[in-house]
Amino acid sequence: MNYQNTLAFAQRMDEQDPLKDFRSQFLAPQHNGEDVIYLCGNSLGLQPVNARQYINDQLDNWKDMAIEGFFDGDDPWLNYHKRITGTLAGIVGAKTEEVSIMNSLTVNLHLLMVSFYKPNKNKFKILIEGGAFPSDQYAVESQTRFHGYDPKEAVIEIFPRDGEFTLRTEDILNKIKEYSDELTLVLFGGVNYFTGQAFDMPAITRAAHAAGAVAGFDLAHAAGNIPLNLHDWDVDFACWCSYKYMNSGPGGISGIFVHEKHFDDKELNRFAGWWGYKEEQRFLMTPGFVPDRGAAGWQVSTSPVMLLTLHKAALDVFEKAGGISQMRAKSELLTGYLEFLINEINKQNGEELFKIITPAKPVERGCQLSIVCRRNAKSIFKYLTDNGVIGDWREPNVIRLSPVPLYNSFKQVFKAGLILAASAAEN
């Protein structure tokens, strides 16, 4: 793509955009009577317009039917989750029975590690990316302690090479091979929250399995952002949140993936609850847990219908937009345009004021660009916010900006570039 640093180019791209009408299906905060330029979908997606009506409909069902709402009406709550499991399976590249919608992300990570972190005296170590999101670090540390190990010995972190910001795939694979006799689990993010780097999940999975280890992924920044093919990649397990790129509301419900090859493994431990019991016998209330078939057998508690409703509202928009492949095509262009504009600012100033630490190759990133500000970083971030550009700050000097294909336009990205250029001049 031959990008141009002009408003006319941005407007032309918007006119040609097959997703241009979806912007109107989201609500944005206001700044001086206009929508803000919201580039923070990596932290929290915007509210779908349909969310309020979907919630009101369920409140009416609760009012009109009370307990009978689980069994009667247009959307009986008992199986409400099944109305969106298929859409979600398409987003993560799974079979429908390999996906379950439940809990929140770190809770699900713990539940999955109960099943898939199976240390013994020889193989007890976990490999994670250095600088993983803190909740993942805390979960891994506490799981190793629970099994009687010192996290300093049981948890291996791999960091980028000196002077580099992102991990090389070859270094990850070599680290797995180096510790193959001791590794029992390789647990990575799909996309690193800080740098925006998308990892080579198929290669990591193959290397983990060659080492006799389980391959699991936290897809918080990947689900709804980049194409995933968890089943065909032979990933063992994964979990994600829904409130970032899937726009399902603050603290929205999470989801899990368990590969079908594990469905009949009677040796897997799990923390059980009644919602994971074999569905057709659940209400017999008999003692002795019999898991439901597939990922549904990892459910613990009754599904929270209001959170599922928000999730459905958002995923219905995904379906109308044609799924992740259509969005990904625009995402690569949109993030590429932001990258181009940032590089133009650097050229105009004769120095690299803003260093993009996210990989340049589209296959190695999603929507997000992480930018190191060489000077006055906090002041620049405040200038952006004061002028209606909503991004995300990470200490000590990183601004994360994520153009999202469903609700951001090329014109918005162009205007964000102008404001970023002005911030450099002011600071």
Image (spheres, rainbow, N blue to C red):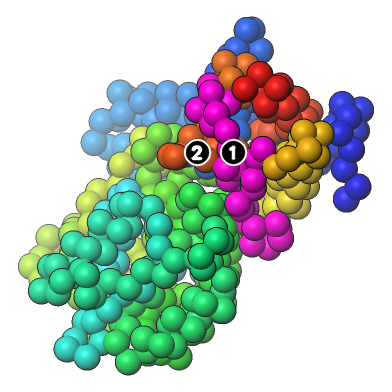
Q: Which mark is residue 387?
A: none
Amino acid carrying mark 1 in the image = Arg
Is any part of residue 339 visible from this angle? yes
Is any part of residue 40 visible from this angle? no
Mark closest to the chain's N terminus, 1 or 2: 1
Magenta range is 353-382
Mark 1 or 2: in front is 1
Which residue shows up at 60% across the image and 12% down it?
31
Provide residue 265's location: percent of width, then percent of height.
29, 84
Residue 236 in magenta? no
Which residue shows up at 86% across the image and 34% down it?
5
On screen, residue 377 above or below 211? above
User: Which sits in the foreground, 290 or 321?
Assistant: 321
Provide residue 180's location: percent of width, then percent of height.
37, 89
The residue furthest top is: 33
Residue designated by label 1 = 374
- If the image is split into quadrants, where does the C terminus sit? top right
Q: Could you say whether the residue bearing mark 2 is in a helix, strand or loop? A: loop
